[in-house]
Image: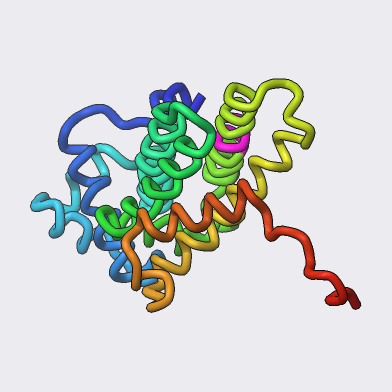
Amino acid sequence: MMDDERERHSVPGDKAEAILEAAVRVLARRGFDATKIEEIAREAGIGKGTVYEYFDSKEDLFERTVMHATWMYAGELQAAVAAGGTLEESLFGAMVASFRFCDDKRHAARVLLNSPVGRGGASVRAWLLGFRREMVETLTQAILRHRGPDFGRDPAVAANVFIGALNNLTLARLLDDPGARGDAPEAIAREAVAIILEGFGREPEGSGC
């Protein structure tokens, strides 16, 4: 679905792609309100008028930049989930991919963190909602594929629990929380997935309220 939506909202041409990449970098540094089209054009090495050949307005460019960053992130997560031979490998791969996205594509990650959904209009809200639904469905299917129909829990709820943990740990890494960035992505992901799969264990006897 994300690929179909991206094709519907995409702007053709290498120059448009260069403008989107420049917009990601500038928006990550400056924020949406402070960013000017002139700055994005300068970052892309083109004139201001060229931007308007591909995008109708600053708002249009903003919306498509958020969609562009979302598509990049979604593609990496979905590929990681699909590559896992077991549920543990799928969850581990998705978490590492999310951490690596923060580390390697930090500008795009910051655009997603800072994007004010309310000002993006219906198209951005629908896009982000579609992304969330697709990730829940991708993980739900991975759970059913690896654990079968007798999983014993609601797989959609389980998928949401994992996404909640993924989002929180990714946010901590993106915000440069020392506790989140002190270890390698693989070490954090391995510990988090173990906790999710094994749970917290039973309370020791006599420790109840």
- Looking at the rendering, which quadrant does residue 136 occupy? top right
Where does residue 45 sit, x and y in percent of width and height?
A: 8, 52
Q: Residue at x 36, y 54 (%)?
A: 186
Where does residue 139 sit, x and y in percent of width and height?
A: 58, 34
Where does residue 82 sit, x and y in percent of width and height?
A: 44, 27
In the image, residue 134 lies in the stretch drawn in magenta: yes
24 sits left or right of 90 in the view: left
Nearer-the-camera pick, 179 or 61: 179
- Looking at the rendering, which quadrant does residue 23 occupy? bottom left
Nearer-the-camera pick, 128 or 50: 128
Q: Is residue 102 above or below residue 1?
A: below
Extreme residue in the left direction? 45
Q: Is residue 140 above or below residue 192?
A: above
Q: Which residues are magenta?
A: 133-137
Q: Is residue 9 above or below residue 169?
A: above
Q: Residue at x 41, y 72 (%)?
A: 175
Q: Residue at x 37, y 62 (%)?
A: 110
- Looking at the rendering, which quadrant does residue 119 occupy? bottom right
Considering the image in quadrants, where does the C terminus appear? bottom right
Extreme residue in the right direction? 209
183 sits left or right of 150 in the view: left
